[in-house]
Image (spheres, grey):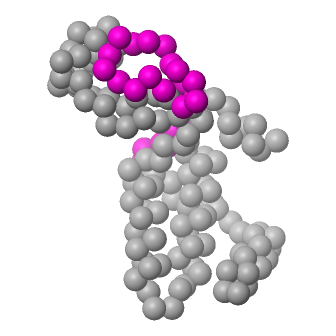
Amino acid sequence: MYWEEFDKQFITFAQNGAKLEQIEVSEEKSVIPEGALHKNKHADFDLDVTKKGIPVVTVKDDNVETLEEIQAQSDTLVQHAEIEHNEIIFSKELTDIIEEGRKKWHDSDEKDKSICLEVGMRLVKEIMENTDDNTGLIDKLDK
């Protein structure tokens, strides 16, 4: 019941001209990466990393820029995650804002819809105006 009422109020607010101009954006951009889908194998890098999606790795020397340089330091390579083509990666600042909003929501006795609205508006502005979209996904969805 609560969420149905919240949805109606949010839709009314948006229809009456919710403004995003005043909303700040992070200094760092979020990113939508180009690369392999998780369901498909990516090119064989000859490294001890996942063969699906896009491996997120570090090596001891953080000044490397090419696959060849990474392969030369494969003994120090650590895979931290695997991401996927078109999977948005939020900046650290935006992630912190979302997590802080979630904590405020869960810690409050009365669920204040303004918390959700504030985080939602920030998220929309970040996605639409502060994301490096390497695949054109945002434009496709906008149409």
Q: Which residue is drawn at 51% across and 19% down?
A: 42
In this view of the protein, which residue sits in the foreground, 111 or 36? Answer: 36
* Above/below status of 56 relative to 92: above
Residue 132 visible in the displayed image: no
Q: Residue at x 40, y 83 (%)?
A: 107
Give yes or no for residue 48 being in the magenta stretch.
Answer: yes
Q: Which residue is drawn at 40% across and 69% down?
A: 100
In this view of the protein, which residue sits in the foreground, 126 or 76? Answer: 76
Give yes or no for residue 99 being in the magenta stretch.
Answer: no
Quarter-wise, where is residue 38 in the image?
Answer: top right
Is 61 left, or right, of 101 in this rendering?
Answer: left
Is 66 left, or right, of 39 in this rendering?
Answer: left
In this view of the protein, which residue sits in the foreground, 53 or 88? Answer: 53
Quarter-wise, where is residue 97 in the image?
Answer: bottom left
User: Could you tell me residue 45's position as x and y percent?
Assistant: 39, 13
Main secondary structure of the magenta stretch: loop
User: Could you tell me residue 84's position as x and y percent?
Assistant: 53, 34
The N terminus, quarter of image: bottom right
Is 15 left, or right, of 51 in this rendering?
Answer: right
* Above/below status of 46 relative to 27: above
Q: What stretch is highlighted in magenta?
A: 27-52
Residue 78 visible in the displayed image: yes
User: Could you tell me residue 143's position as x and y percent?
Assistant: 82, 41
In this view of the protein, which residue sits in the foreground, 18 or 40? Answer: 40
